[in-house]
Amino acid sequence: MARTFDLSGLSEDELTDLIDEATSIRAIRQADRRRETARSGPERQRQDANDPNHGTIPTPTPR
């Protein structure tokens, strides 16, 4: 779902600032994704809620 923004009223400096900020935000998001991928990499055991030994602490259910 692509959004359309009217940037025609922005000056050259404003466009440059906008591009720089967007690039910075993109880099931060990519770094976060890489960190998350590294944390849940193939060497880490994933939790399977159907496995009785999956490691979560059971909580009582309300009656």
Image (spheres, rainbow, N blue to C red):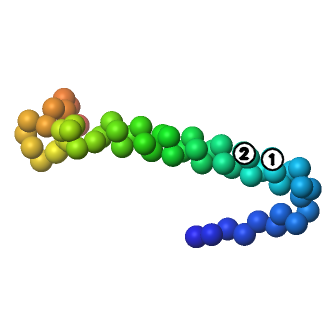
Q: How far apart are the alpha carbons under marks 2 and 1?
A: 6 Å
Name the outermost residue toward the top.
57
Element under label 2? helix
Give percent across and percent down for residue 44: 22, 37
Quadrant housing residue 25:
top right
Left or right of 31? Residue 47 is left
Which residue position holds label 1?
A: 17
Residue 23: x %, y % from top left = 66, 48
For label 1, count other residues whose C-alpha is less than 10 Å away and answer few (under 14), some (14-19) or many (20+). Answer: few
Amino acid type of the residue that numbered disc 2 sits on in the rendered structure: Glu
Q: Position of residue 28 (x, y in %)?
A: 57, 40
Labels 2 and 1 touching (C-beta < 8 A): yes
Instruction: Tell me what residue is drawn at x 33 percent, y 36 percent.
Output: 39
- According to the picture, the residue beneath numbered tag 2 turns out to be 21
Tell me which residue sits at (48%, 40%) in the image.
Answer: 32
Residue at image x 91%, y 62%? 9
Q: Is residue 11 above or below residue 48?
A: below
